Image (cartoon, rainbow, N blue to C red):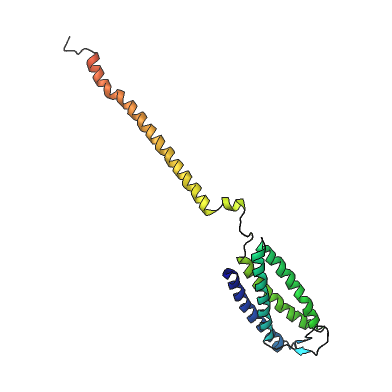
Amino acid sequence: MKAIFTPLVIGTLIAAALNSVIFLVAAELFGEAFVVDPDGVGGEPSMAVPAMLPAVFTVFQAIVGGVIVAAIALATKTPKYTWRFVTLVGLSLSLVPTAFASLGVASTFLWLSGMHLVAGAIVIPLIERVLPAQKNGSTPNAESDSPTKKGSAEKGSAEKGSAEKGSAEKGSATKDSAQQDPAKKAPGASAEGSPSDTSL
């Protein structure tokens, strides 16, 4: 789980910082008021969004995401693809209450939606990278291409080649020895089998 929560924390901190910058740029440079409806139905007075709220809300979303990714990693056989599907659907649905909270002001909706998308674009891929595609198993092709098995195959091939080379060298040496023996016996045979000139 540590491998999962480390990128979650890092991504959350980056996203929170970026969303705070986006909020300040929108408020100070573009004059965005960021007045929202707390309950989304007009039942409560409008509320101005505090400067720290984007960062706090980003951290809250990351906590929810941490619970979701923990459940996915434990309960599903394909954590990577399940995480991608769930988070993309959740990110899309999160824009619906943002639209209601924006009181029909298009610019506020766009800025708030942009913050959602920034957080999702940072956190979702970071966690997806550390999640396995298949849980507790791998495909046969992956096993056959594994470095350990590949190394064993190469080692076996090298040993087989070495054995064949040794057999070939041994056979060649035996053949050369057999060819040299008659040559060694030839002078002796000539001396014994044919009469010398002195005997005549």
Q: In which quarter of the image is residue 74?
A: bottom right
**Residue 80: percent from left, percent from top:** 66, 64
Q: Quadrant of residue 79?
A: bottom right
Where the N terminus falls, by quadrant? bottom right
Where the C terminus falls, by quadrant? top left
**Left or right of 179 on screen, residue 153:** right
**Left or right of 61 on screen, residue 99:** right
**Foreground pick, 117 / 194:** 117
Look at 61% across and 79% down and name the residue there. Answer: 13
Residue furthest to the front = 75
**Residue 91: percent from left, percent from top:** 73, 73
Residue furthest to the left = 198
Look at 37% across and 34% down and name the residue there. Answer: 170
**Residue 131: percent from left, percent from top:** 62, 65
Rendered view: 175 above or below 11:
above
Look at 67% across and 81% down and name the residue there. Answer: 19
